[in-house]
Image (cartoon, rainbow, N blue to C red):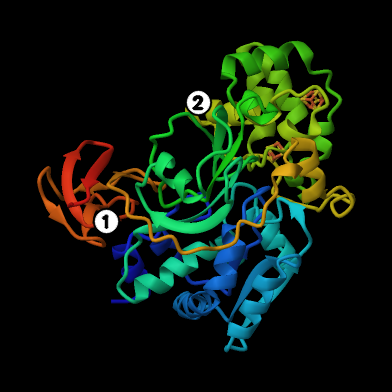
Amino acid sequence: MNLSEQVKQAGVIGAGGAGFPTHVKLAAKVDCFLINGAECEPLMHKDRELMTHFAKELIGGIKLAYKAVGAKNAVIGIKSKNQDALNALQSAIDDPNISIHEFGDYYPVGDEYELVYGITGKHIPPQGLPLDVGCVVNNVETIYNIYKAANNEPVTDTFLTVTGLVKNPISTRVPVGMTVKDVLQLAGGTTVPEYGMMESGLMMGTLITDINQPVTKTTGGIIVLPADHNLITRYSKTQKEMDRIGHSACDQCSYCTELCPRYLLGYDIQPHLVMRSLGFTAMGKELWNKYAQLCCQCGICTLYACPEALFPREACVKSMQNMRESGKGKWEGSTEIKTHPMHDHRRLPLKQLMNRLGVTKYEAHAGYRETSPEPDKVYITLDQNVGAPAEAVVKKGDVVKKGQLIGRIPADKLGANVHASINGRVTDVTDTKIIIERDK
Ligand code: SF4
Ligand code: SF4
């Protein structure tokens, strides 16, 4: 079995948040294999900790993967500030074709377009993939999972950081399907009775609305904030509320565009023009919607740039959806990309972003600790990946072992297998999830 097939069997997907099935990337042929260790989300440290504590496994995974795709070399993108991780990787590298590229502490250098440009100097074509410029990019946790897959170990755990208003901020790994409520206990629980939570990041993550929701293969962290924190309030708004505020208050100052990292990279994305779509007729909308198409949803416009605290990112997301639904989602603008002359001068330092978000005081080391949690119950969702949801291959009452296949990729579809993350008995199977209870 080749590496791509092993990775497919093991259910490896992009752990950086995207959830794209990794076996597809490994079946490609490219010149350069890139590894994304440029963790950018404020307060999140699980990638830094993974690189520090599992450097040997990472380098092992990189060696297998870059050879599998026929690349001549592999480059790890990492921020210079993460000195412990850098030292660990440098000591573990035993292959002259693997090197390290250091980034400054800016947001969002981990965006795939930024990462590829930063390391290779190449622009991915609009709406294109790294593959279009001879590269493939994988997050560090994905590489770790590739290494495990090559040793016949499927994905059963996810690495995450638990931080913010918790007693002992921590980075650790937990079984996929463990509830947020159980995960919080690994950090000693929350320090306040009333709080709000974000999953996987403050900029590109999502609001957690149910403490009993399970973590998935792509969960990178849980951040606990005061219930009345500005970020929690903003993420709680409905699309209708955001549209209404934007329609009445946008003065077209264009700061959102001037600070947009994709615009600064040279792409024709202009959120201030997209904001006009909120007040126009269906025909006018189409005109403005197209300026949203190259948005990576980094959130700078909404959470940092806009002086009126409006929602240009959300307007872009809605516009992209409108275009897709009307069959006009394909980029028809210029494919010539020229980096904006202010690209290097308008970068957003992470510290500045954290000050603006009002989260500097929640910064904590959140070092790695092995917690080996044994949850009584896990809720393993079948749609953790890009593509089709997995199809259950177990039924209520079945006894399963950790690592056993419980959901399979549907025939001829893009998807990912799922495996039991604990030993136990299947207590329910629905279209969306499989529940396993630990045998006591
Ligand atoms: S920064 Fe805010 S107010 Fe200015 S154009 Fe953008 S959305 Fe409108
Ligand atoms: S979220 Fe805003 S700043 Fe980020 S890429 Fe999209 S438009 Fe640009």
Coordinates of residue 313 in the picture (x, y in percent): 67, 31
Q: Secondary structure at mark 1?
A: loop
**Which percent across, then down, holds residue 154?**
32, 65
The residue where tag 1 is placed is: 422
Look at 50% across and 25% down and name the residue there.
326
Above or below: residue 13 compared with residue 363: below
Upstream in the sequence, badge 2 or badge 1? 2
Q: Is residue 405 above or below residue 388?
A: below
Cα distance between the residues tagged 2 and 1: 44 Å
Query: In which quarter of the view is residue 181 placed?
Result: top left
- Which residue is at the front of the view, 362 or 146? 362
The mark tally for this picture is: 2
**Which quadrant would the N terminus be assigned to in this image?**
bottom left
Q: Is 117 left or right of 384, judged from the image as shown?
A: right
> Which kind of residue does numbered mark 2 sit on?
Ser
The dot on residue 350 is none
- Quadrant in the rendering for residue 100: bottom right
Q: Which mark is residue 326?
A: 2
Q: For residue 328, which quarter of the picture?
A: top right
